[in-house]
Amino acid sequence: MSVGLKQPEKINPVAGVKLSATHAGLRKTNAADLLLIELAAGSRVAVTLTKNLFCAAPIIVVQEHIKCNPPRYLIINAGNANAGTGNKGLLDAKECCRYLSESTGVQEREILPFSTGVIGKPLDVKKIKVAIPALLQALEADAWLKAARAIMTTDTLPKAISRSVRTGDTVITITGIAKGAGMICPNMATMLSFIATDADIEQTELETLHKKLVAASFNRISVDGDTSTNDACVCISTAQKEKIYPGTPLWQEFEQAMLEVYQHLAQAIIRDGEGAGKFITIKVINGHTETDCEAVARAVAHSPLVKTALFASDANWGRILAAVGRAGVRLDIDQVKMTINDVLIFYNGQLADDYTEASGSAAVAQDEIVIEISLGCGVAEYLMWTTDLGHEYVRINAEYRT
Amino acid sequence: MSVGLKQPEKINPVAGVKLSATHAGLRKTNAADLLLIELAAGSRVAVTLTKNLFCAAPIIVVQEHIKCNPPRYLIINAGNANAGTGNKGLLDAKECCRYLSESTGVQEREILPFSTGVIGKPLDVKKIKVAIPALLQALEADAWLKAARAIMTTDTLPKAISRSVRTGDTVITITGIAKGAGMICPNMATMLSFIATDADIEQTELETLHKKLVAASFNRISVDGDTSTNDACVCISTAQKEKIYPGTPLWQEFEQAMLEVYQHLAQAIIRDGEGAGKFITIKVINGHTETDCEAVARAVAHSPLVKTALFASDANWGRILAAVGRAGVRLDIDQVKMTINDVLIFYNGQLADDYTEASGSAAVAQDEIVIEISLGCGVAEYLMWTTDLGHEYVRINAEYRT
């Protein structure tokens, strides 16, 4: 089940990026579970990694490698997170890099490994090594969709999008893929995302832009408030095409296109969130500070009571207000105003005069719900996206390993 | 469904406390929904109230009244929270007090009103007023169990307990009742609890003791991380019997008995938590500070992923570690050690050598689960109680108003 999520439309190759995917046998089904991405020499990469202290072994390797040379290969497996695997896990992740290094002639530290799947199982490195020669053979530019499928875990649909920016005769392409779909919380969800452009962006500018875009996309989604051990978002500039300088009109257009890619992928993760039946936008406006607005948005987004009510299409606005009230933000409740899909619910410390159970129920019966909460004390705002919480979430997470 | 919760055993009256309950028609079923408690003149009362800014109207009235004279009457209704009802709700709560004041001759400010139930519906004050004369007639010392039943909402069983302390020929009684069972989070759950003793405790000592006991009981329970608008815990000393002074052996015995009452009631709320299938104790030990230990305990207790795994009796320890890792506490993961019901799971940054899936599964298959997490960097500790998260929780909370 997913909310308003469709099969990706035409996904365009990015000059300087080749991909291949195969079934190496790391997961139970016979879908592809191993992805190799090759980057042209001279590519630049910015990464955002999980802040979870129990981060997976590959995350530790990426932290080390990214400090050295720009990466040339990314190797990603699904089905096994290689997390909670101690020193053995670290050696396993490194062994994958070592073997790929031998097979390609690039240095080990020019390879970034990523894993997603079950925590605490030893990684079957042998299967990965066996699969590598064929993966190297099969590398092609037009395999983004195949790549999006290879990194899926509980996702029901692949997540991919392309945008382009035209400058003179040149078409700059941006293509990104992502996977969700549970353990989703801001500051990195259980998600992997790889976004590449063939535009030529300087390293420091790429990092600044990436950070800004992650804050406006992946760090604003929440399924269950859990931060994964393996999250990573990677932004690549292959520098095969036009150089783009910040502050120019072209940069603005480029940044906008990049933002669309990031936000589409972040929202796609929520739309395909485990057991998601509704896509919920929480918009907190007129706050004193953005931090206040964010605290309120997160309190609402993480409330199981709010989420179960929305699952049941119950306009139980009291639970939303209760979440607002415990967010730890100073506010005058008589100034708080709340609408759900533009139906005015709460105003002046009480239920709106013309509110009826019927209008409230009609509003929450939609698949796409916008909850707007005005704190009435400033001009700051914060917006985030989440899902409802229903039986499907419980079923998927209770049966995940069975 | 509840976990290891039984019908209360013999509940003893407390000298100086009389109670009566009736069905006033504030809820759909025809169970009692209105409770009156009369306290002897000279009683002392300490209260802990919700910190939710959207607190219910009666909470605001209690905040005002408690500053003045010691209370003589408590009037509690179930079925309607009188929250999110604005100024009208405040007038309604006050009207109940005014009417009871007229009927009894005590001052309005000597009356404390409490409500629990659905948020955002106007309180039917007329029904309450109609019921008051008969309630006053029916007051009796031996009605604690009836009282415990009258305040139930989604509770499946009444929650009540008595303890006694003997000093010479005098028996000091402590009796408490409580209701849960959803929107349960530390710093006041959706809970009401009334605990009375006939011991003579000075006002300031009562307040200090009450605060200490709440911190060791009700503030350590969590069902869903939601803090209610109506929570209140009331501690009463009717001063009808022996005076007890802090620092004496008798005080120690008394404090221990009080702690048992508080903890029994707090745990009973969890055992009867909405949809609870398991009673889970989270014990974080060997931390640097208690604050660190508490942060880790709360991260685990609030994780829907941990709770759905426990619901499914799945020893998915990786989710527990992931919660530990994102608790925002500095720790060396190689020092972290985890046991579930004494089965050693994680140690030295990896799965314990002799851990097997079978031993883990056997541990989480129990109804009562103790997760012990040693942070390995100090001597501080924190303990809390929570439930699993299953279909029953979703069902109850999705259908709450239907």
Image (cartoon, coloured by chain):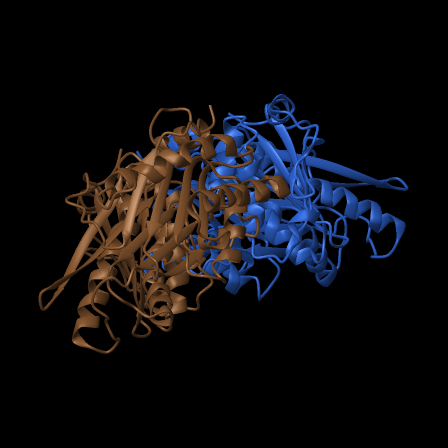
Chain colours: A brown, B blue
- The residue sitting at the left extreme is A169
Horizontal side of A372 relative to B38 (left or right) equals left
Residue pictured at 32% horizontal, 63% vertical: A213
Could you say where residue B225 lies in the image, as x and y percent from the top left? 49, 47
Q: In the picture, residue B174 is in which quadrant?
A: top right
Q: Is residue A43 visible?
A: yes
Horizontal side of A4 relative to B396 (left or right) equals left
Residue pictured at 41% horizontal, 32% vertical: A131
Give the vertical position of B65 relative to B334 (above or below). Answer: below
Horizontal side of B66 relative to A278 (left or right) equals right
Give the vertical position of A128 relative to A246 (above or below). Answer: above
- The residue sitting at the bottom extreme is A247
Could you say where residue A274 lies in the image, as x and y percent from the top left? 35, 37
- Residue B27 or residue B285, whichever sits in front: B285
Residue pictured at 36% horizontal, 29% vertical: A23
- Residue A343 or residue A188, whichever sits in front: A188
Q: Is residue B83 visible?
A: no
Q: In the picture, residue A298 is in which quadrant?
A: bottom left
Which quarter shows the C terminus of chain B? top left
Residue pictured at 31% horizontal, 49% vertical: A317
Could you say where residue B306 lies in the image, as x and y percent from the top left? 52, 38
Give the vertical position of A85 relative to A288 (above or below). Answer: above
- Residue A227 or residue A278, whichever sits in front: A227
Could you say where residue B15 lies in the image, as x and y percent from the top left? 71, 43
Q: How many marks?
A: 0
